[in-house]
Image (cartoon, rainbow, N blue to C red):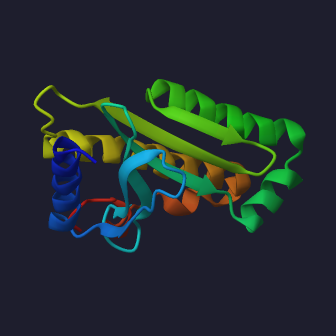
Amino acid sequence: MTNIESEIKNQIREYLIDEGILRTQIPDSENKIEFGFRFVFPPGPKGHQMVVFKPKNKDLIIINAGTQVSPPHIEALNSLGEDKKIKFFMELRKLFLLKNVFFRIDIQNYRYEVSDQFFLKPDYKIPKDKLFSSMRKVFNCTAYSNILLNEFCHPDEVGKFKDFDSESDFSLYS
């Protein structure tokens, strides 16, 4: 790892520590990344586990979040029939395209992942707001996908959520 890459790694680690969301460093067992970190965003019990990493020989940072649909939701999706199940995943695809994120959808295994990336500036400084904006973009896609999944699997319960409380605002500091 070069000095510049080490500086970028330290900068991102410090941002994650400052906000109390850093969890662990990602080991590079396949020699594909310069560095990477696992974190939870936003902090607190409603946060989603995500990763941030710099691929080897690339001048970009990637923020990624994966989602495995839970067994009860898989059962509910399957009970809707193949057409409705495919419709759910098509709605996800449309969402991800509209939000301009990268994505992978594995319908057979009921999982998907969402990524955002940004290129490093020539001075290799990463503005904190740029990093957190990218995190928020990925998180919002995963949060919306969970809302959509609940709407598909439990359409009769949607009315229960008409009154939002402070627990559902996904604020970084709540």
Q: Is residue 51 left or right of residue 131?
A: right
Please name whichever residue, 72 or 102, is drawn nearer the observer in this view of the structure.
102
Q: Is residue 50 shown above or below 43? A: above
**Residue in view at x 13 percent, y 40 percent:** 127
Query: Height in image: 125 above or below 169?
Result: above
Image location (x, y in percent) of residue 74 = 78, 58
Looking at the picture, does residue 155 appear above or below residue 127? below
Question: Residue 82's quadrant in the figure?
Answer: top right
Residue beneath the point at 28% across and 48% down: 1
**115 horizontally vs 107: left or right:** left
Above/below status of 131 relative to 22: above
Query: Observer-nearest residue: 144 or 26?
Result: 26
**Exactly how many numbered labels are in the figure?**
0
Residue 27 point in image, percent of width and height: 45, 62
Image position of 64 (left or right of 118): right
Q: Residue at x 26, y 41 (%)?
A: 133
Point out residue 43 in the picture as x, y percentages from the top left corner.
30, 67
Q: Quadrant of residue 54?
A: top left
Residue 73 percent across, percent down from the top left? 73, 60
Q: Quadrant of the C terminus?
A: bottom left
Of all residues, the one furthest to the bottom in this rendering is 45
Q: Is residue 122 rendered to the left or right of residue 92?
A: left
